[in-house]
Image (spheres, rainbow, N blue to C red):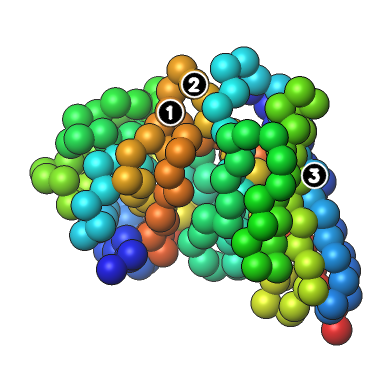
Amino acid sequence: GQSLEQPSEVTAVEGAIVQINCTYQTSGFYGLSWYQQHDGGAPTFLSYNALDGLEETGRFSSFLSRSDSYGYLLLQELQMKDSASYFCAVSLRSNDYKLSFGAGTTVTVRA
Amino acid sequence: DTEVTQTPKHLVMGMTNKKSLKCEQHMGHRAMYWYKQKAKKPPELMFVYSYEKLSINESVPSRFSPECPNSSLLNLHLHALQPEDSALYLCASSQEGSGSYEQYFGPGTRLTVT
């Protein structure tokens, strides 16, 4: 099986930077994805990393280190609308269709 | 059109009822998924259809029965559910395997079993 660990909650003020770490234990790792879900809403895709390094998309960046089985999502210039749950998810070589989600990190942005 | 639609939005059903959840996408995606999500928990994969064939069943009880009538539609038939099956049921689709392609989620059906 596989396991993913991410912090359960993070609180920060508007304009701050937040880093959500995700460590995973799995065999046959294929890639790491990040999804955002607002209360009452559907998960929406943020980013995907299959290779080591940083992927930047606007205010959000995602990083992967395959050798450390570790990734993070960086939220910059935090806005109130960024208050949401953030899930990391791994996909495996053996089954490319399946995403296994971490427990999620609730980010609360304060004024 | 990057939208996955789901009907109904809300459903209340008794333990002896039979109902169906519907999901539709018109993005030409070849993979479609059913997830179950409890409050404050991550989505849990239930079923995956690839090219209209069931490719993954995550040991889901037989009271849940998926169906993929065509490449755009996905149904989940419900029968003799238990109160613990109350949850948000999410449908998703992706171009191909989820490892390389993002999954697009529908807004979900909030199911209450009484």
Q: CA distance from mark 1 to mark 3?
A: 23 Å
Q: CA distance from mark 2 to mark 1?
A: 6 Å
Q: Which residue is mark 3?
A: A21
Are there few (<14), some (14-19), or many (20+) residues within 10 Å of tag 3?
some
Q: Left of A65 or right of it: where is B66?
A: left
Q: Residue at the spot x=25%, y=42% of the render?
A: B30
Check disc 2 and report the residue beneath it.
Answer: A93
Q: What kind of residue is marked 3?
A: Asn
Q: Are marks 2 and 1 on the same chain?
A: yes
3 or 2: tag closer to the N-terminus: 3
Q: Quadrant of residue A69?
A: top right
The answer to whether marks 2 and 1 mark residues whose Cβ atoms lie closer than 8 Å is yes
Residue at the spot x=71%, y=27% of the render?
A66
- The mark tally for this picture is 3
Residue A81: x and y in percent read 67, 77
Residue B57 in sight here: yes
Same chain for the residues under marks 3 and 2 in the image: yes
Residue in the foreground of this view, choosing between B97 and B106: B97
Instruction: Name the amino acid type tagged 2.
Output: Arg
Question: Where, by quadrant of the figure, is residue A14 drawn?
Answer: bottom right
Q: Residue at label 1? A: A96
- In the image, residue B6 lies at what x, y percent? 30, 61
* Cα–Cα span, label 3 and label 2: 22 Å
x, y percentage for residue A42? 49, 61
Q: Secondary structure at mark 1?
A: strand
- What SS does tag 3 mark? strand
Residue B69: where, in percent of width, then height? 11, 44
For label 1, the crowd category at 10 Å Cα-Cα, with few meaning under 14, some 14 to 19 and many 20 or more, is: some
Vertical arrangement, residue B49 with respect to residue B26, above or below: above
Q: Chain of mark 1?
A: A
